[in-house]
Amino acid sequence: MTIPRRSFLHVVAGAALTAGMRPASGQDYPTRIVRLIVPFGPGGAPDILARLIGQWLSERLGQTFVVENRPGAGGNLGTQLVIDAPPDGHTLLLVSLANAVNVSLFEHLNFDFARDIAPVAAISRDPNVMVVNPSFPTHTLPEFVAYAKANPGKVNMASPGIGTSPHMAGELFKLMTGVDMVHVPYRASPPAITDLMGGQVQVYFSPIAAGIEYVRAGKLRALAVSSTKRSDALPEVPSIAELVPGYDSGAFYGIGAPAKTPAAIVERLNREIEAGLADATLKSRMADLGSVPFLGSPADFGQLMAAETDKWTKVVKFAGIKPQ
């Protein structure tokens, strides 16, 4: 049967239009520059890890992954930007503990994180390291607790913002030890560390990736790490749990995408990130930062987010934490 030329052209045009409307398959992706949104300022642990993963993905997928720092509202501004982006895998979110905390910290968010962000892959679960200025008059964790109890309200505790991992680590420490410290939020880790070294604040539960080089250089004194076990990166530093049984706090990082991002793209990204976390060179770079790779499926990352949201909801309510 011969198809009239005009009808044939309509069929071809319709097929082309339909193909253009289809989401890119995992093999086609990415077709242009990918934006990886970090909802915090530059120089902190989220930024460092995002750049490591972004560089790996750029090399693996043949397109540039550009890290964009979009701080504000405890990470909500950057998160909203990703939620509002087309669900085609070309705008991604560096997910962190702050996203789990913000669910209960902010009463009137414009989004539902669990509904509006699709989990793609976890990157790491990292302890915080509790650091003080070398001139601070305590050298061990028991000494610090004794000093803080003897000087209630006189120890200033820095953080890169309300609801961030360092803030929540400090709030959990306050709850479990009974010490009274004054929270001093900053916009990112670098200025918090600068003021800690300058003596304006006295303690910081630093993301290990952001603070470890200062500890190794002797510019900060590490009292403890916030995980249940000691960190391989700082094996001589005790865990807080050695003094405070049951204490467990730390950061986690991963990649999220707008909801309705095609499953093929999510699976491709997960597969490539998993390959990176198993790569000897990238693992070594992460280990130098004290960062512990966390491998798993998108569903595994979703389960981690749900568990962390539940855990920190209880702390936020018990401590009466409010956004600024």
Image (tube, helix red, strand yellow):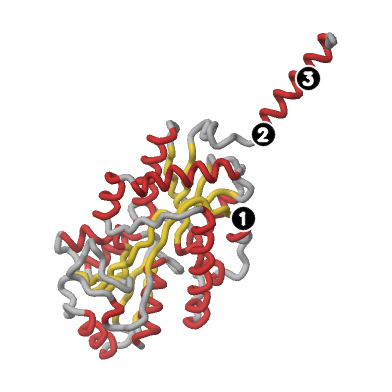
Local secondary structure at mark 3 = helix
Residue 144, above or below 69: below
Query: Between disc 1 and disc 3, whose residue precedes?
Result: 3
| Closer to the camera in the image, 274 or 252 | 274
- Cα distance between the residues tagged 1 and 3: 36 Å
Tag 1 residue: 116
Tag 3 residue: 11
Residue 26: percent from left, percent from top? 55, 37
Viewer can see residue 39: no
Q: Kindly indicate the quadrant of the structure image that contains residue 276.
A: top left
Determine the residue positioned at 44% across, 34% down.
61
Three-letter residue code for mark 3: Val
Q: Which mark is residue 53?
A: none
Residue 278: percent from left, percent from top? 35, 48
Determine the residue positioned at 37% across, 41% down.
56
Disc 2: CA contacts within 10 A as few (<14), some (14-19) or many (>=20): few
Query: Between disc 3 and disc 2, whose residue precedes?
Result: 3
Query: Between disc 1 and disc 2, whose residue precedes?
Result: 2
